[in-house]
Amino acid sequence: MSDIFITDLDHTFLRSNQSISSYSQTIWNAKAHHHTLSIATARSYSASMTFLSKLHLKAPLIVLDGAMVVMPNQEIIDIKYIPQELANSVIALSYQLQILPFIIGLQEGFDEKFHYSDGLNSYQQEVLTNYLHDPRLCYQKRLQAMRRTLKIVYFGSKTQLSDLCETLQKTFGEALEYKLSPEKYNDGYILTLLHPNADKSHALKIVSEYIKRDLSDFSVFGDSLNDIGMFKLAGRSIAVYNALDEVKAHAHIILPHTNDEDAVARFLEKH
């Protein structure tokens, strides 16, 4: 029976310059002939596919932190939306608190959109510089939720977002999933709001059921806080050397190499 490997992308499989080395590509494609290889990422489907276009992909992909499980051909296996009324309530409170989020969701069909508005802080402005020519980017004079909102995302300082997260939790309780973690591409933090069952751990269960394999058969790779749920479920959890200490504490294996040293591919080649 083939092995199943699921890897996070940013700072795990991707290098810090957001690329996949030719070595990692070669190892992935060689292993994909005999094993099941896939990803679990906070990135959207289309953003993920820009990196994965040269990789052999046959298994379900976990994208948007687990809000969507989708096949490489865009067949949606599972999707979890934030109800539009709830999302608009979050946005209304955001206006009161004077910190607006980015809204990520789907328009008609599989049309991904990334909505933003005025009044961006320096962290958000830095993020937007990476999306200047992205067709998903959509300015709104007055920010509103989409009918199929998948993520509400804030960028800011740790103190600012910690206070915001506390306020949102007091206001909306268990109606949402709240994920606060360092943003490793700059010195800020990121706060992500999701459907309560839209995280990597729930998505991993869905993949397990879809391919009819037990969770004990899965090996998962990661580096950040949103990977811990997967680490707790999978038969084997593997942290790259540059992973956060909180993540390493839940790992069965801590690799001696970083993402910039092709840690995942090195492990795959040996196993």
Image: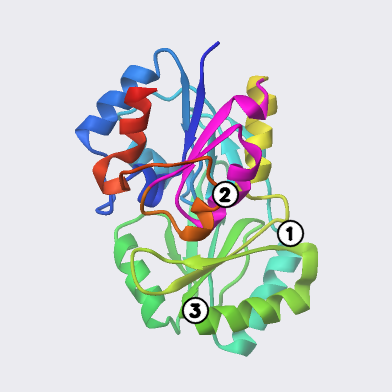
Q: Which residue is mark 3?
A: 158
Answer whether residue 69 is magenta in the image.
no
Q: Residues within 10 Å of mark 3 (few under 14, many from 20)?
A: some
Q: Which residue is mark 2?
A: 250
The one nearer the camera, 242 or 39, is 242
Answer whether residue 229 is magenta in the image.
yes
Quadrant holding the C terminus: top left
Relative horizontal placement of residue 22, taking residue 201 as reference (left or right): left
The one nearer the camera, 86 or 176, is 176
Cα distance in 3D space between marks 1 and 2: 32 Å
> Which amino acid, mark 2?
His
Cα distance in 3D space between marks 1 and 3: 27 Å
Q: Are marks 2 and 3 in contact (CB under 8 Å)?
A: no
Range drawn in magenta? 213-240
Q: Position of residue 229 (x, y in %)?
A: 63, 48
Quadrant of the rendered image containing residue 231: top right
Q: Are marks 1 and 2 in contact (CB under 8 Å)?
A: no
Cα distance in 3D space between marks 2 and 3: 23 Å
Q: Residues within 10 Å of mark 1 (few under 14, many from 20)?
A: some
Q: Which residue is mark 1?
A: 83
Asked whether the viewer can see residue 82, the reply is yes
